[in-house]
Image (spheres, rainbow, N blue to C red):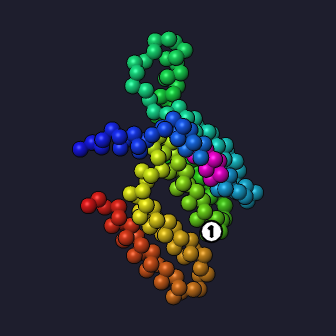
């Protein structure tokens, strides 16, 4: 059964202004993620510079596609300039730019030695970027993510456990075992939350 029109309007009200705000937030987060994952470039391979440029282009294209918004249901205008603009917009929407930013940021992070907290912070920032991109694309309020709050919290808990386990010295046997057990239990909880009832 579909939701009432009033509920839908409440969830997505002020779509244009809210979409622009979410797109701006997504753009700032994307730029921050690319810069954070690229630093330091001094010890990275030469290919890292090329990947940074590609990641920056993906971030810019992602923001552009979010600002354009979803495709219109109106019939295609037969004016050549408008038709060319509509075709370019469709091509821009067809590519998953946001996912490209995430993948490239993770690759850049893996190209140089990083402390566990550095990678953990990047994971949180990438998660925030994906949420901002989703809200901008759907023109929805942040309240639509409320049902997923337990799952998000559990995922962040797993990230904290992973960072803690990676930060432990190799000779810390018992503490590492305890964290491994906690991580396994948290994974079970996350899986239980993810399975629809």
Q: Quadrant of residue 170?
A: bottom right
User: Crowdedness of circle 1 by 10 Å Cα count: few (<14), some, many (20+)?
Assistant: some
Residue at 40% from the left image edge and 70% from the top image edge: 187
Q: Is 59 situated left or right of 135 in this image? A: right
The dominant secondary structure in magenta is helix
Q: Does residue 138 appear in this view? A: no
Q: Quadrant of residue 121?
A: bottom right
Residue at 65% from the left image edge and 68% from the top image edge: 115
Determine the residue located farthest toward the right in the rendered image.
42
Tell me: residue 68, above or below residue 151. Answer: above
Q: Quadrant of residue 57?
A: top right
The residue stretch that appears in magenta: 26-34
- Please identify the quadrant where the C terminus is shown: bottom left
- Please identify the quadrant where the N terminus is shown: top left
Q: Position of residue 117 (x, y in %)?
A: 62, 68
Q: Position of residue 167 (x, y in %)?
A: 60, 75
Q: Position of residue 86 (x, y in %)?
A: 49, 22
Residue of label 1: 117
Q: Does residue 81 appear in this view? A: yes
Q: Is residue 98 magenta?
A: no
Tell me: residue 75, above or below residue 108. Answer: above
């Amino acid at each position: 059964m579909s939701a009432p029109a009033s509920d839908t309007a409440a969830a997505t009200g002020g779509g244009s202004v809210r979409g622009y705000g979410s797109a701006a937030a997504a753009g700032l987060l994307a730029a921050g993620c690319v810069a954070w994952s690229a630093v330091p470039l001094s010890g990275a391979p030469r290919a890292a510079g090329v990947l940074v440029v590609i990641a920056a282009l993906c971030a810019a294209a992602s923001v552009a596609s979010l600002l354009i918004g979803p495709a219109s249901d109106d019939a295609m205008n037969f004016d050549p300039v408008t038709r060319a603009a509509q075709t370019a917009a469709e091509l821009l929407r067809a590519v998953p730019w946001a996912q490209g930013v995430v993948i490239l940021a993770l690759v850049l992070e893996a190209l140089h030695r990083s402390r566990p907290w550095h990678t953990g912070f990047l994971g949180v920032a990438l998660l925030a970027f994906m949420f901002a991109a989703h809200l901008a694309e759907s023109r929805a309020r942040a309240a639509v993510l409320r049902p997923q709050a337990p799952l998000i919290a559990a995922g962040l808990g797993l990230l904290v456990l992973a960072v803690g386990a990676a930060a432990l010295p190799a000779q810390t046997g018992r503490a590492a075992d305890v964290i491994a057990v906690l991580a396994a239990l948290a994974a079970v909880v996350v899986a239980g939350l993810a399975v629809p009832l």
